[in-house]
Image (cartoon, grey):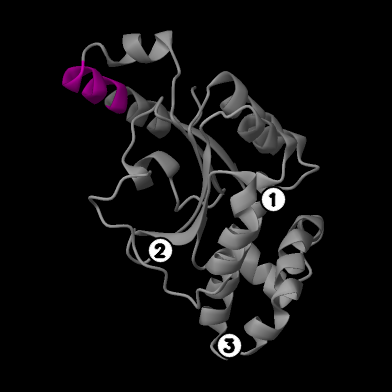
Amino acid sequence: MRALPELFQKNADWSRKTTEADPAFFDRLSKQQAPKYLWIGCADSRVPANQVVGLDPGELFVHRNVANLVVHSDVNCLSVVQYAVEALKVEHIIVCGHYGCGGVAAALAEQKLGLIENWLRYIQDVRNEHRQHLDSITDPTAKVNRLCELNVIAQVANLCRTTIVRDAWDRAQPLAVHGWIYGLNDGRLRDLGMCVKAACELDERKASSVQLTGGATPIPPSETIA
């Protein structure tokens, strides 16, 4: 007996509906992968990358981990980035966090969770960098959400400092790195003002983005990534 038959049925239904809407979809998809975007997001099941930005399979290359971190020793993440930049020639890398992130909340509260504490240590480094500012926020939810924003900004900076991204910029390859955050309560993306297109822009962009005090502006539906 097949395990999880309900998921196989949902897959069959999705395949049938997709083919009915576009008979050539799977044939076209199987022959090439040419996304313009790499998404580095949280593993949270409530943030499905393709659906959030309304893109079809094949249009968005995706890497996800707990709390959307970019760690210089994480060979998994860096391998995805290298393949996306050097082989797929993506033009945009989006680091997207989300408000109410459980990983960020656990890091802020210094919860005892075993192995994952070692991973969350990177978020605690961000917390320590901005401790005075975070301590000034009295509402617990607002404090977690602010650290979610600061974490995205920090991960964009980490990504921009990798040899992969720096080398792409050195050879004048068009590449922009963006920092966004997603609202679980309304399904909207917010631009954190952290868009970096060259190494010389990083420090200024980071300083400017950190000045945000929360509630970043939702991206208008008509606005495109530039």
Q: Is residue 50 left or right of residue 170?
A: left
Instruction: Looking at the image, tell me whether mark 1 or mark 2 is earlier in sequence order.
Output: 1
Residue 19 covered by magenta stretch: yes
Badge 2 crowding class, 10 Å Cα cut-off, few under 14, some 14 to 19, many 20 or more, is some
The residue at which mark 2 appears reads as 183
Q: Point out which mark residue 137 bears.
A: 3
Q: Mark 3 packing: few (<14 Cα in 10 Å), some, or many (20+)? A: few
Q: Position of residue 23 (x, y in %)?
A: 21, 13
SS state under label 1: helix
Q: How many marks?
A: 3
Identify which residue is drawn at 53% across, 24% down: 89
Residue 7 lies, in percent from the top left, at 41, 32
Q: Which residues are magenta?
A: 14-22
Q: Amino acid at mark 1?
A: Asn
Identify the secondary structure beneath mark 3: loop
Question: Residue 186 at what x, y percent from top left?
Answer: 32, 64
Query: Is 27 in front, or is 2?
Result: 27
Q: Amino acid at mark 2?
A: Gly
Label 3 vs label 2, nearer the camera: 3
Q: Quadrant of residue 29?
A: top left
Which quarter of the rendering shows the C terminus? top left
